[in-house]
Image: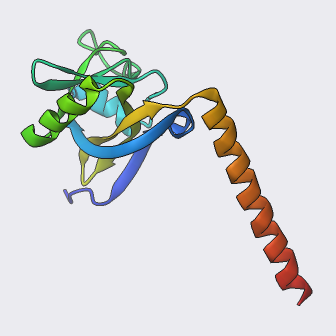
């Protein structure tokens, strides 16, 4: 059987980029059970309330919802269980130092398969205030309006 190639996105946390200032991103592997992998391959997962925490020198993913596999038996997984993330030791040490600073948190951005392995894109993020969110929306709308005006000018000649 040929090995799977490329990147297949299973779930994204679109609200994370709206609610947080993203400082740095990390790619981490996830320790999963068999039925979790099958549920992910079916394209079912939710990162909405998810976060990661560093405990005892290990990084754990919490509150990520992977529903039970439909065809699973009595040994199906718990949908919101804690899952261990696989990172290098220097990355974990960097995350320990950063998360001890006030305001930083670890937020999952996307869950995907890369060359057959389940991976998660984890962001070191700082929460936005409501006025920051309004400012970001205003910038995006201004940029969109400028692009429209330029497109109209090009069409006119």
Relative to 109, residue 33 above or below:
above
Q: Residue 92 location, x and y as percent?
A: 15, 34
Depth check: 8 or 60 in front? 60
Relative to 39, residue 89 above or below:
below
Q: Residue 80 location, x and y as percent?
A: 36, 15
Depth check: 145 or 50 in front? 145
Type of colouring? rainbow
Q: What residue is at 86 percent from the left and 80 percent from the top? A: 153
Q: What residue is at 28 percent from the left and 33 percent from the top? A: 37
Quarter residue 131 falls in: top right
Q: What residue is at 40 percent from the left and 23 percent from the top? A: 50
Lateral position of residue 13 relative to residue 95, left or right: right
Lateral position of residue 126 relative to residue 136, left or right: left
Depth check: 48 or 143 in front? 143
The answer to whether one can see residue 12 in this image is no
Quarter residue 135 falls in: top right
Q: Residue 6 location, x and y as percent?
A: 32, 60
Relative to 84, residue 145 above or below:
below
């Amino acid at each position: 059987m040929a090995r799977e190639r490329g990147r297949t996105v299973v779930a994204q946390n679109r609200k994370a980029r709206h609610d947080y200032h993203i400082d740095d991103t990390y790619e981490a592997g996830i320790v999963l059970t068999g039925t979790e992998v099958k549920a992910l391959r079916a394209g079912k997962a939710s990162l909405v309330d998810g976060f990661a925490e560093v405990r005892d020198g290990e990084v754990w993913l919490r509150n990520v919802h992977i529903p039970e596999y439909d065809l699973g038996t009595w040994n199906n997984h718990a949908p919101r269980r804690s899952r261990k993330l696989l990172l290098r030791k220097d990355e974990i040490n960097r995350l320990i130092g950063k998360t001890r600073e006030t305001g930083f948190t670890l937020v999952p951005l996307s869950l995907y398969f890369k060359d057959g392995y389940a991976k998660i894109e984890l962001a070191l993020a700082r929460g936005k205030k409501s006025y920051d969110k309004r400012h970001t929306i205003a910038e995006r709308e201004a940029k969109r309006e400028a692009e429209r005006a330029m497109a109209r000018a090009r069409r006119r000649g």
